[in-house]
Amino acid sequence: MNLLPESALDRLQEGCKIIGDRCSAMDISSWEVVATQSYGHQIDIEGGKISLAAGGGEGGFGIRVLEEGRFGFAYLVDVNSADTAIKSALSIARMSPAVNGFVLPSEQSAQPVSGLYDSSVVDMSSEDLLIQADDIISEVASLDDRAVVTGGGIGVSANASAIYSSEGVNAAGVTTSHGVGVQVSIEQSDQLTSSWQSTSSRSRISQANECVNRAVEWAKLTRNPIKVETPDDDSVVMMTSEGFSPLFSVVVPNAIRGEKLVREESFWSGHMGQNVIASDLSITDNARIPGGRSSGARDDEGVPTRENPLIDKGRLVASLWSTRDAAQQIAEGRIDAAKSTGSAIRSGHQSPPISGCSNLFLTSSQKGQSYEQMLELIEDGYIVNSVMGAHTANPTSGDFSVTTSSILRVEDGEIIGAVKQAGLSGNLAKAMKDGVLLGKEVRQQGSYSSGSMYLPNVLFKQGLRVNPV
Amino acid sequence: MVMTKSPDSVISGHNHKYLDVDKINKSLDKVTTDGAAYAEVRLVAYTDYSATIRDRKLERAIPGQEIGATIRVLADGAWGVHSTTDIASLEQQMGPTLKLAQSVAARRSSNDRPISLAEVPIIEDSLHWKPKKDVRNTDLADRLELMNLLSDSASGHENVVSVTCGWHDEHIHTEFLSSEGMNRTWSFQRSLINGMVTARDGSDVVSYRTRFGGEGGLELIESCDINQLGIDAKTSALRLLKAERAPSGKLPLIADRDLTGVYIHEALGHPCEADLVAAGDSCLDGKLGQKIGSDIVTVIDDPTIRGGYGSHPIDDEGLDTTEKLLIKNGVLTEYLNHRETAAHFDIKPNAGARAQDGLHHPLVRMSNTLIHGGTHTDLDELVEDLEYGVYACGSRGGQVDTGRGSFQFAAQEAWLIENGEITAPLKDVSVSGLTLQILNNVDGLTKESKLAAPGFCGKGQTVPVGDGGPIMRISEALVG
């Protein structure tokens, strides 16, 4: 059975039009309706076997109405209850402060982004996923007969979305996704080690070997821990893309939002135009990457997306804005000029848009190093492949103090053994200011906040403290 | 397109039913005739309202209605699950969900133990935890008044650059029908207010979060001293501006009620979840009846505490909720379980099944997890014996690796303890350790145990939880 029901998108747009027409009938001149609908299959793996097969669909509509710079929002699942939701949104708008100059985005032509839809994903059945799950379980066992997939699974989805507004925006599309996640554990001689790895794509993942291999490799690498003394000072730490992305995603996307910067709620506030990280490093948000997890022709209020260089060779040059955030900060006098950067994001149909990142890239003007080259540069330090508690990092200050059980001790360029557990702390904003070396291989990672991250392995020469148990 | 076609789009009251009981029961009968050992339909309708103000200005208010239902079919010892917002399609989806279960079963090897369910009483009833003040009848203006009170009390200092306050309330209505004849309907409400104070001094920026809430309606928020909540948050944020980085290493630690709750939730609660134990992903596997903590440690998980953020009258398999005694005087006495894991371990079901909403299947989850009180009178008595250590307060969350039994949690603020006295304020304190070591290191608890600030727990699905206890002293923990 095809994952996506026939004419799903047409019916979603029809729902938007019905709600939009109701807004007009209620004399609301400025309104915007968004709709989302997802369909998916999922296989769960637990304790080395398939534990469950699931499927289904969910979705709904969000309505934003605007009256003299005041906006209100409501969401619903049933088009027939549109009038109630519209009235709720309108009553909220009338209690909201007016933002002078805030108008809903007008229609602008948007170029499509390729690689966001793969019909072979839509064609996948639960049976196809069961075969993939079996393959993963077998693959793990073949790589190490002690290794077991203790958790994880496979999922595919087709996600239809539409936006329709009084300002002429009328767009819709379907994206697909296919994801694999595996928690591999090795338990032997009263010692348990494990590793979680995942991968996702807009296209069909025919082989999850790299993800599975990494999970088994790290479950093996972290066995037989050695005793390590606590260093007195900062340590040299190579964070793999997987280990670094959770911290990066908690701290950086928040700091780079325009309204956070002008409200002085970012550690980079007041530094526009100044060097804020090492002079070879750049950070760019790009929603136009073909096949990107958070790519799209338009942002979540219908504005065409674009590539947004944010930090250029260490210098803070721009920030991310949605239409309302920009208008509000101008109206409240915190900034003279700002406009949408095509960076409005939503948590589905249930929330109005805010400013946020899409696909965030960390790059260097220096030549990227291989894993082996970076390892050779560590005389006395560590490699960290995952951290626990990244969500407890402080996005306002950049401070973090997390724990890792996936950490290797390195001396004179060689891995000498695993450390059972260690604390890892520092301030990410300060650690990125100097002595940072990037790997050459970039991997796409998920995010705690919004969007996705494209990150290489990162070698920090200063600013991080390791506290082995 | 899958969009709900419910009989009535507005959630109107306790007596309203979304499921056509006769039709669903017929489809449940049919699917069992066709080969299912068990089948159920669980529908959840939410009416919720969230709002945010920043510096007294309304940023957003979001009224919403959600409805979703999940079919679970157990056939040949395997589960098939279907979730949808299209309530009208439930009967049609029963057959395909049976086939899904049969497909999983067909792939199992002969060595795999088939899934079965523990026997439970079959109940037909309606149970509603009615609030004193139904939160659905609250105007936005009333919500704003309470949020403004929090904002005002947290503001008013040159270093406070912004105060953001949030509100969330929800009415949760659940209908449950099973092939065994279970027919239950229940409802309850949750309400929450929170605030975040951001303070700045030069290039130093800090933030402090505060939160109050639980099971109940508007009366719950009205029972809170919101003014004091705001003042405390502001004081803490300003103190953090002057705080030093914490010392690192193995140190004695005193945790306030919030952190004690997060600690016991992460370090013990998760490894006690029987689905993780059965999957080979818990350090407590095989340890029932064994001593795993010091004598003074007794831990319960209790969804029946009215007002707790994790409270609920009936679990998501239709069982009456009950208190679970997880540890008694240091001995592991009980896992949290659901029907599948109760059968797996041949133990009594204790109603630990929870799902995020109507679109998710139930997992074994905590509710309100607490350590019982001890014998120390107060914080001073816990501190006076310590030459050097850390007193940590307020939670920024935590995480656990249940298989290894290693955990981490972070404090919002902390103080140094020197020569029996609380001295310099500290920031960015996190604590990590191994469950089976740290439970043995608990050497002091104050007498009064109660729930702390409400929280959320993620395990693939997010559910509201309560946790807490007394003020707790740990003789040695890894502080970072």
Image: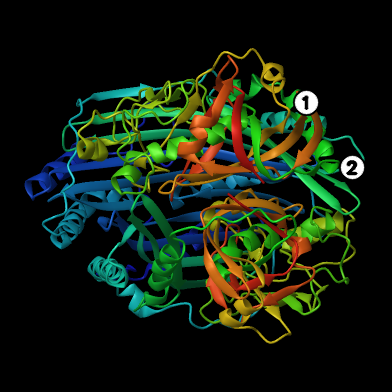
Q: Which residue lies at the image location 84% right of the left edge and 59% below the top edge?
A: A269
| Residue B122 is at least partly visible in this image | yes
Q: Position of residue B86 (x, y in %)?
A: 34, 52
Q: Position of residue B414 (x, y in %)?
A: 73, 35
What residue is shown with label 2? B159
Q: Position of residue A168 (x, y in %)?
A: 62, 70
Look at the numbered disc 1 and give the secondary structure of its residue. loop
Q: Position of residue A221 (x, y in %)?
A: 45, 66
Residue B360 lies left or right of residue B111; in this view the side is right
- CA separation in Å, label 2 and label 1: 32 Å
What residue is shown with label 1? B419
Q: Are marks 2 and 1 in contact (CB under 8 Å)?
A: no
The kind of residue on which mark 2 rests is: Asn
The answer to which quarter of the image holds residue B252 is: top right
Q: Please, which chain is the residue tagged with disc 1 on?
A: B
Residue A82 lies left or right of residue A5; in this view the side is right
Q: Which residue lies at the image location 15% right of the left edge and 49% below the top edge?
A: B114
* Marks 2 and 1 on same chain: yes
Viewer-nearest of discs 2 and 1: 1
Q: Earlier in the sequence, mark 2 or mark 1?
A: 2
